[in-house]
Amino acid sequence: MAETMLKIEDLKTYFYGDDGVVKAVDGVTITINKGETVGVVGESGCGKSVTSLSVMRLLHDTPGEIVDGSIEFQGKNLLSFSEKEMRQIRGNEVAMIFQEPMTSLNPVYKIGKQLEEAIQLHLKYDKQKAREHAIQMLKLVGIPRSDEIVNEFPYQLSGGMRQRVMIAMAMACRPKLLIADEPTTALDVTIQAQILDLMRTLREESETSIMLITHDLGVVAEMCDRVVVMYAGKVVEETDVYTLFEDPKHPYTRGLIGSVPKLGKNANRLDSIPGNVPTPSNMPKGCKFAPRCSNVLKVCLEKEPVLEKVEANHTCRCWLYQNTETVGV
Amino acid sequence: MLKYLIKRLIGIIPILFFVSIFIFLFVHMIPGDPARLVAGQDASLQDVEMVREELGLDRPIHVQYFSFVTNILQGDLGTSLKTKRPVLEEISQRFMPTFWLTVWSMAWAVIFGLLIGVISATKRNKWQDYLGMFGAVSGISLPSFWLGLMLIQLFSVQLGWLPTGGMDSWKSYILPSITLGAGVAAVIARFSRSSLMDILKEDYIRTGRAKGLHENKVVWGHGLKNAMIPVVTMTGLQFGFLLGGSIVIETVFSWPGLGRLLIDSVSFRDYPVIQAEMLLFALEFILINLIVDLLYGVLNPQIRYE
Ligand SMILES: Nc1ncnc2c1ncn2[C@@H]1O[C@H](COP(=O)(O)OP(=O)(O)O)[C@@H](O)[C@H]1O
Ligand SMILES: [Mg+2]
């Protein structure tokens, strides 16, 4: 059995707003082993980013709160960590890349300084050594003229270059786990491919575990070992990447796969899922996907299914596969 | 950078030219006859006319303006009608007290304003925020002469800790600079609070935290440097209010500065002094604007001086 890097169990992160509670993450279980890349997919708003921010305990300044569940990193329960202990983890053992390269770098600090901050903090390098390491990291992520770039400001770089800088920053302290929250979504297609290439190369060299958040199944197919499909704050299916594309179980997953435009085929998104993600105030009573589901049963509207093993290495939250005896209907 | 500075300094010349026209016309519209004032209330009409001629006030207005400008260019600001001493001497004597009063007011206004602003922004909707903003609203809405009088009443009259006025020791600076700086501190506090609150929502703040930086470093480093960009402009504008405010404060605290000189010279219709003071105020304003623009570039790397 591979060494477990991250184990999120039954995580619940709620937002307390003026008009009630938003259950952004409502029982998410994800396990990531050493050296493994796990994709987290789902439509916008299903709680992917909140899950990742919960792992980093970066919900400051939001009305969000982790209300239940556990997050274990290398066997240590992150939820019991003090803020000080968390700071030693962040940017060091667990690093993060965000979706928006254009706004994720501080506009008033030079690139070099922004990299060196984490390097000096975690690796305890002196200024000069930190600078050398920063330049080396920039070289590693394929930035030309890296010894000059350290003295430049973010606005002087393109979006793709900035995302490379973010990756350099994230990898600088050799993290054991990299959380990449839609790292290529904001980039155009050719740059996307370059960034994914880069991430693959870095992964092979460093054996870093990656939690790759995306709503693009193309990215999943290219990058991931295993996939977790999320819908409305819950995991609805989990399996390895081959099984996911060969034999998807959940109607939502099938819909997602169907909505990927394929080359040569009619790319009219004929199979794309009709309807919208339910709003928090309008959550269905039973299965959250029932109102959009083409295989909906009577029970789906009344009772929520649980995440159950349908095959070895394949779990699914759907009445179509539910073992009725264990659930007791 | 140097080229930009020279360009800006040259640009001041035409501005000052227009300002001088405006000031000249303005001063000449002040009701009251300076010749009569100089000659005295009981002087004969003939004497008044003689004085008028002596002062050159009988000449057409554009001629008067022309000699006003040429004299200034030669460093001659005229003679005070009241004291008969050169205006330059009068003003330079009064400049330093006002300068230091302004500097001290500004210094503590910036320090406390930022401190309150940052604390309020990071503790928003907690008691620190409410207290800070209550203080700020008070600072903005209390008339400064009233605040000055209250401070004198408390610290000078009742407790006897600080002098009521004058400029004898460092203690004399405390009350006037607090009074003068209060409004500015309040504006800076409110402005930096809202500016920083917006900045703290930015993605790069989250990046800073995700690096493992201490929250203080995130707020005072990454946050404040960005939040300062609008605050600096605001603070520059406040300098202008300080100049105006000093007129009231110097009267309340018997401060031997430019503000009181202006009050005295206006009531005496000492127009050479009035003109010179107004010109000086305008020049200060222009220079502060220039400094603000330069500071802007220090804070915001995207600004290039061409
Ligand atoms: N700062 C916030 N304040 C209130 N609600 C939030 C906040 N961030 C996220 N949410 C809620 O959490 C839900 C999930 O958001 P998110 O995790 O960002 O989705 P995504 O899967 O697109 O990354 C959103 O629909 C929203 O209602
Ligand atoms: Mg997201």
Image: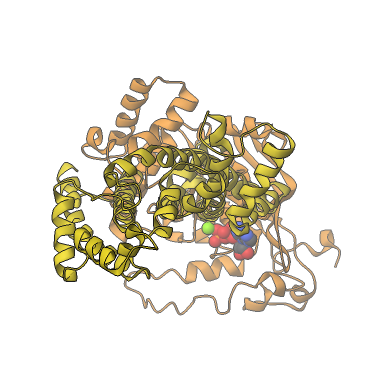
Chain colours: A orange, B yellow
Q: Give B147 or A128, whichever is nearer the viewer.
A: B147
Choose top left, top right, bottom left or bottom right for residue A164.
top left
Judged from this view, the residue extending furthest toward the right is: A328
Quadrant (top left/top right/bottom left/bottom right) for the N terminus of chain B: top left
Q: Give A273 or B163, whichever is nearer the viewer.
A: B163
For the point 40% across and 40% down, the residue is B99
Choose top left, top right, bottom left or bottom right for residue A199.
top left
For the point 27% across and 51% down, the residue is B303
Is residue B112 in view?
yes
For the point 39% across and 54% down, the residue is B265
Q: Residue A141: x, y in percent?
A: 32, 39
Q: How many numbered circles are shown? A: 0
Q: Residue A294: x, y in percent?
A: 62, 78
Taking the image as shown, residue A103 lies to the left or right of residue A57, namely left
Taking the image as shown, residue A127 lies to the left or right of residue B148, namely left
Q: Residue B161: x, y in percent?
A: 67, 31
Q: Give A109 or A274, whichever is nearer the viewer.
A: A109
Is residue B202 in view?
no
Taking the image as shown, residue A79 lies to the left or right of residue B29, namely right
Q: In the rendered image of this protein, does residue A180 appear above or below residue B108?
A: below
Q: In the rendered image of this protein, does residue A267 appear above or below residue A39?
A: below
Q: Residue A185: x, y in percent?
A: 41, 58
